[in-house]
Image (cartoon, rainbow, N blue to C red):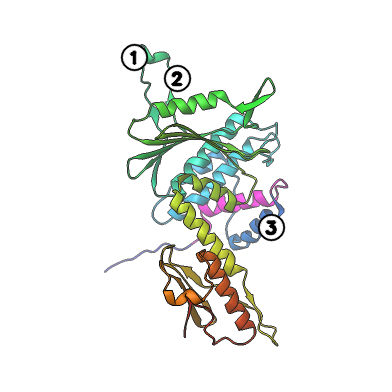
Amino acid sequence: MLVCEKDEYSPDILLNQVMKSTLQSICVNRYVKKETRKKSFMQLDYLHEVGEIQLTKKVFTQIYYGRHNVHYKRMIHLAKMLFELSLLSHKQGKWSLFSAELDEKALNGIFEKFLFHFYRIEQKEYRVSSEVLKWGLEGNTAFLPQMKTDVSLTHKNGQEKIIIDAKFYKNTFQENFGKSTFHSHNMYQLFTYLMHQKKELQLRGILIYPTNGMDVDEKYQWSEDVWMEVMTVDLDGAWKEIYGRLIGVVQSEDSKKIEQIQARIDEIFKGIEIRPEYTNEVILITEYEWNGKMNNFRVEYFIGSTKYVFHYPERLSPELDVYEISGDRLEQLENEVMYVKRMMARGIGAKEYYPLTEILR
């Protein structure tokens, strides 16, 4: 006889309890944006079967991950960060980042953790670590301070490395005799980290500060393979902006260009509203795809069940010389999509619209 015992599903588990308690704390915090509080309140509807707990440091030490719950990991990291941030204020729940009541050293630790886990989770090209460097000095090393990086990103090709130093300061600049400069000890520290790396590496050292009144993005070259950078990230901005700013650090120039092109394509299609004459109908183009290439540029999209293919080849056929075709592929795409829009609005949807657009029914 075979006896099987199965677990009963229950949503009332510690991970969901942490999620619910975090959402509740966001809902009642007047320093959080109203829109965020509203969205958090709406999410609570999904957790009506989950009990409430008081968040403590001990609660987070009781959480373990396996294959069945690893998808909670990012949420728990965010919940822990918000919990730690709330502890820094003398007034419970006050999260104003630059309030004088907040401990700058503790905030710097949270900022450092945030950057470390951001790059660990959001990208796969670099291995993320915090490394202890050895002084290249002879003598009694007992009195030498420890050199430990906040975030070290080592590319999987083994040839590129980025060292990030997180600095949560109220002011990105120091004042000296009326002149604003970057904090000298921060620059010295980062430069020292770079000078203790293998000579064959392509190195970038980056100081990252939170934006507080002024946006900064400066680059300095030491040699052909060694660069230092100072940048800020606006932690009060939308997540999309924070994400774009930070992920840009690890993107190649080609990747950044592709992202910019995709954003422009999104802008073209999301701005299209087709309003056929004599009807109240509004047609949007929501399904479209770019092949990711510029030399053989191709975008497919649907209007209703009809498929349209815009193809700008690497070399244009001499037969197309009779048309005024822009040398900018994105501009030509927008011209042809707008022409399609006008024809559709007039009810002439079956016409061959433009030289580079093919209609597939």
The mark nearer the N terminus, 1 or 2, is 1
Whether pointer 3 and pointer 2 mark residues with C-beta atoms closer than 8 Å, the reply is no
Residue 156 appears left or right of 49: left
Front-most of residues 150 and 80: 150
Where does the N terminus fall, quadrant-wise?
bottom left
Badge 1 amino acid: Glu
Mark 3 lies on a secondary structure that is helix
Q: Which mark is residue 127?
A: none
| Residue depicted at 61% across the width and 61% down the height | 48
Q: Which residue is mark 1?
A: 138
Asked if the magenta segment contains residue 323, the reply would be no
Front-most of residues 148 and 279: 279
Q: Which residue is mark 3?
A: 38
The answer to whether 326 is drawn above or below residue 79 in the figure is below
Question: Which percent across, then down, holds residue 24?
Answer: 65, 52
The mark nearer the N terminus, 1 or 3, is 3
The mark nearer the N terminus, 3 or 2, is 3
Q: Which residue is mark 2?
A: 145
Neighbourhood count class around disc 3 (C-alpha, 10 Å): few under 14, some 14–19, many 20 upward: few
Question: Which percent across, then down, holds residue 32?
Answer: 69, 48
The answer to whether 221 is drawn above or below residue 141 in the figure is below
Residue 52 in sight from this viewpoint: no
Badge 2 amino acid: Pro
* Residues shaded magenta: 10-32
